[in-house]
Amino acid sequence: MTHDLRAETIRFQGAGGADIEGYLAQPTDVRPFGSVVVIHHLPGYDEATKQMARRFAAEGYAALMPNLYSREAPGAAPDDAAAVARAQGGVPDERLVGDVDGAARHLRGLDGSNGKVAVIGHCSGGRQAFLAACSLALDAAVDCYGAFVVGNPPAGSSLSARPIVDLSPNLSCPLLGLFGADDKFPSPAHVEELDRALTASGKAHEFHSFEGAGHAFFAVDRPSYRVEAANEGWRLIFDFFNRYLAS
């Protein structure tokens, strides 16, 4: 069933009490509903990721995507804002956690919320989803090919991201991981290392790797898009959220 929805740009309190921009999509015909913080990828607060937020609302979940580059480049086009953020090494981890916390608080405060909140991210957002789930009390997390949870950025990269696999014992909720078998960041070896760390810590997780898919296989606007992997990935995501975000 596809639900009616409303989508709009809002302001909410992020890390340090900062007033930041966000994109909120929510169903208008579902009560109560679970919620999802959508973390955009390194290319930024773009239309493709807003479409993902609307898809969650159409499936009966409220979804809020913080504009992580609100401070660096307020009002800038996504590509320009991403360039500024990339030149500065990316979003600081501590600030990311604060922005996700603020988004989760906003979602829990919505009329009709059942109080349950998940986080999802792709690429850099996948790493940040894992970081948030290891730093905050959440109900579910989805890491879609998050780079540098394990391993460092390649030589010459401007990103300052460090590996955070050591945070595995702090994971607060079940984790779903979706990966491309042909990806390099994260590579299958990176995924195996994360799997071992979570297993050793006794953390609930399920990982799926897709043959013939590389990085960004969900991205319908890129040559990397793989329709079969993406369709199966969406099915797994909604099955996962139905288990952990239902009232």
Image (spheres, grey):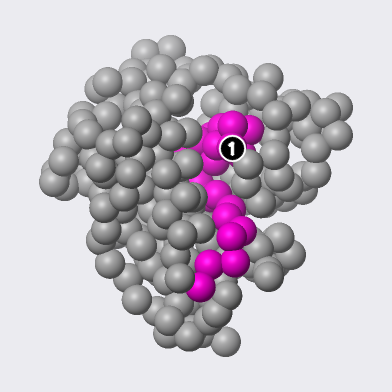
Count of numbered circles in the view: 1
**What residue is shown at x 54% (from left), y 50% (from top)?**
120
Which of 111/207 is in front? 111
Residue 74: percent from left, percent from top: 16, 41
**Is residue 130 rendered magenta in the image?**
yes
**What residue is shown at x 50% (from left), y 46% (from top)?**
121
Q: Which residue is mark 1?
A: 136
Residue 181: percent from left, percent from top: 66, 43
Q: Which region shows up in magenta?
A: 112-136
Residue 132: percent from left, percent from top: 55, 37
Which of 235/128 is in front? 128
- Relative horizontal placement of residue 32, taking residue 203 as reference (left or right): left
Callout 1, which amino acid? Leu
Relative height, residue 6 to residue 15 (above, below): below
Relative height, residue 105 to residue 101 (above, below): below
Residue 71: percent from left, percent from top: 22, 34
**What residue is shown at x 53% (from left), y 81% (from top)?**
30
**What residue is shown at x 53% (from left), y 67% (from top)?**
113
- Asked whether residue 196 is in view, the answer is no
